[in-house]
Image: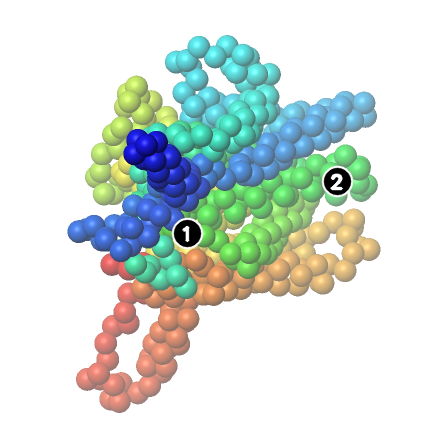
């Protein structure tokens, strides 16, 4: 009788313990609460996050842009062939295939497929359909991820930002296989988006806008290709800006707000549209000279990192790739600097190259480079527009050219204004700046006032202005 009474009691206790056991989606909160109550000695909080996989929207969006631009360029090339426009057809195909081939090589290099037995994937890359198969792989990983608990492959340590400041201890988060694979896909497509934008979409948009002005009519396919190219360029510029922020503040959990994205879109859109329009208008009057302007910009931005590298007497970074020799490393660095130069021809790249660093990016860029770039670019755009205005052809007699000149100058000024607004009010890490835009402007105005004062009034109290070029915390 006693044994019969004890057995139901044990079964009830076992059922109670199983029901009170936290489920998988509660692991994060339970461990965070326990760690917050008993933090470790180094002030870290361990957060275990199984099954939380974010959708690969960036991969899907980059694939849609790639396919849309490729299809529109193919249809437009067919239209040029029917009308015997051999020059337009050849240039359109060139600006379509060159970034496509580089995109296939980038995806193959990032995923290391050459050393793996994946013939179907390599065949898709040969057909220029690599982004499609990669996007399908990312969607499959996302659909399968989070359904069961996975062993973690790495640990990510970040500091949370509250109101733009780093508060509280650092959080360590375990990253599973699914999240790791999706991170590789996202990083690969970020690189391809930048390549597609500034090695394909930028020259493609410039070419089609020039062809539209020369032929004096707009084809529907050409208009669609110009719109898609413009969207691709703006998206590539946004990727550059976000990557620059993530590289500079790698220790922080950075999240961009919708207002920050809106401000960046206005900044980048106005900057790129004004720059391309200026180059196209100048090329309609000075066809040969615009090539000289483009090559000059290309050579300046291409050799700038190399001159700084040689001036420092630095050595080539090691471990960029295990199987690379010094020649292979040099070739990769030349390709990176070429992409860097192409970006700066059309807009601000948001990063400064440091060829001696393993990450190839300067971690503490200065306000000075940003100010010098936009000052010189504004002067160049105004010079090109004024030269076009004085030597324009009769084609523009039905266009209010003075108003067009004013609009281009005002639009570029608005782009600079939105850039300043972003860094002052919308930057996710603006409170971590050592000096912001307001401090730089105030210091510049105060320094000018001191220069205008008589020497005897401030001869003893005159000091050099503080170095406001470094906007990061020491």
Closer-to-camera residue (285/327)? 327
Q: Give the image location of residue 51, x and y in percent.
A: 45, 36
Quarter location, residue 26: top left
> How many marks on residues?
2
389 horizontally vs 166: left or right = right
Placement of the N terminus among the 4 image quadrants: top left
Q: Relative to 397, does residue 303 appear above or below in the rendering?
A: above
Q: Give the image location of residue 326, x and y in percent.
A: 27, 23
165 horizontally vs 414: left or right = left
Closer-to-camera residue (78/392)? 78
CA gap, disc 2 and disc 1: 37 Å
Q: Give the image location of residue 145, x and y in percent.
A: 48, 31
Which residue is the extreme one toward the left? 41
Closer-to-camera residue (383/448)? 448
SS at circle 2: helix
The residue singled out by tag 1 in the image is 254
Q: Residue at x 24, y 80 (%)?
A: 462
Q: Residue at x 46, y 39 (%)?
A: 52
Quarter location, residue 466: bottom left
Query: Crowding at label 1, few (<14), some or many (≥20) Cα neighbours within 10 Å?
Result: some
Q: Residue at x 24, y 89 (%)?
A: 456
Tell me the tag on residue 223: 2
């Amino acid at each position: 009788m006693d044994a019969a009474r004890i057995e139901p009691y044990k079964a009830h206790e076992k059922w109670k313990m199983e029901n009170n056991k936290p489920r998988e989606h509660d692991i994060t909160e339970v461990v965070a609460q326990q760690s917050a109550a008993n933090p470790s000695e180094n002030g870290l909080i361990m957060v275990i996050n199984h099954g939380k996989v974010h959708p690969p929207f960036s991969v899907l969006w980059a694939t849609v842009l790639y396919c849309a631009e490729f299809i529109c360029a193919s249809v437009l090339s067919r239209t040029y062939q029917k009308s015997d426009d051999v020059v337009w057809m050849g240039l359109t195909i060139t600006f379509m295939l060159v970034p496509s081939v580089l995109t296939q090589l980038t995806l193959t290099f990032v995923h290391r497929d050459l050393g793996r037995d994946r013939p179907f994937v390599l065949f898709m890359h040969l057909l220029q359909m690599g982004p499609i198969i990669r996007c399908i792989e990312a969607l499959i990983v996302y659909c399968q991820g989070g359904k069961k608990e996975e062993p973690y492959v790495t640990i990510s340590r970040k500091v949370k930002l509250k109101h733009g400041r780093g508060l509280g201890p650092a959080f360590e988060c375990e990253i599973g296989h699914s999240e790791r694979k999706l991170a590789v896909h996202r990083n690969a497509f970020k690189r391809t988006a930048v390549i597609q934008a500034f090695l394909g979409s930028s020259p493609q948009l410039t070419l089609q806008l020039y062809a539209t002005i020369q032929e004096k009519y707009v084809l529907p396919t050409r208009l669609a290709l110009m719109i898609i190219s413009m969207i691709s360029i703006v998206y590539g510029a946004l990727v550059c800006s976000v990557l620059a922020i993530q590289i500079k503040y790698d220790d922080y959990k950075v999240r961009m707000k919708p207002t920050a994205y809106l401000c960046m879109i206005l900044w980048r859109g106005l900057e790129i549209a004004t720059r391309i329009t200026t180059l196209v208008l100048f090329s309609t009057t000075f066809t040969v000279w615009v090539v000289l302007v483009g090559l000059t910009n290309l050579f300046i931005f291409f050799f700038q990192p190399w001159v700084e590298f040689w001036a420092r007497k630095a050595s080539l970074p090691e471990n960029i790739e295990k199987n690379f020799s010094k020649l292979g490393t040099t070739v990769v660095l030349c390709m990176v600097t070429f992409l860097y130069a192409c970006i700066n021809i059309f807009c601000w790249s948001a990063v400064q190259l440091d060829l001696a660093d393993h990450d190839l990016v300067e971690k503490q860029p200065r306000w000075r480079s940003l100010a010098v770039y936009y000052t010189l670019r504004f002067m160049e755009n105004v010079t090109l527009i004024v030269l076009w205005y004085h030597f324009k052809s009769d084609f523009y007699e039905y266009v209010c050219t003075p108003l067009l000149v004013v609009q281009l100058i005002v639009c570029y000024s608005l782009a600079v204004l939105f850039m300043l607004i972003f860094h002052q009010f919308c930057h996710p890490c603006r409170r971590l700046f050592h000096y912001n835009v307001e401090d730089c402007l105030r210091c510049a105005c105060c320094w000018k006032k001191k220069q205008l004062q008589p020497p005897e009034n401030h001869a003893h109290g005159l000091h050099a202005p503080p170095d406001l070029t470094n906007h990061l915390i020491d």
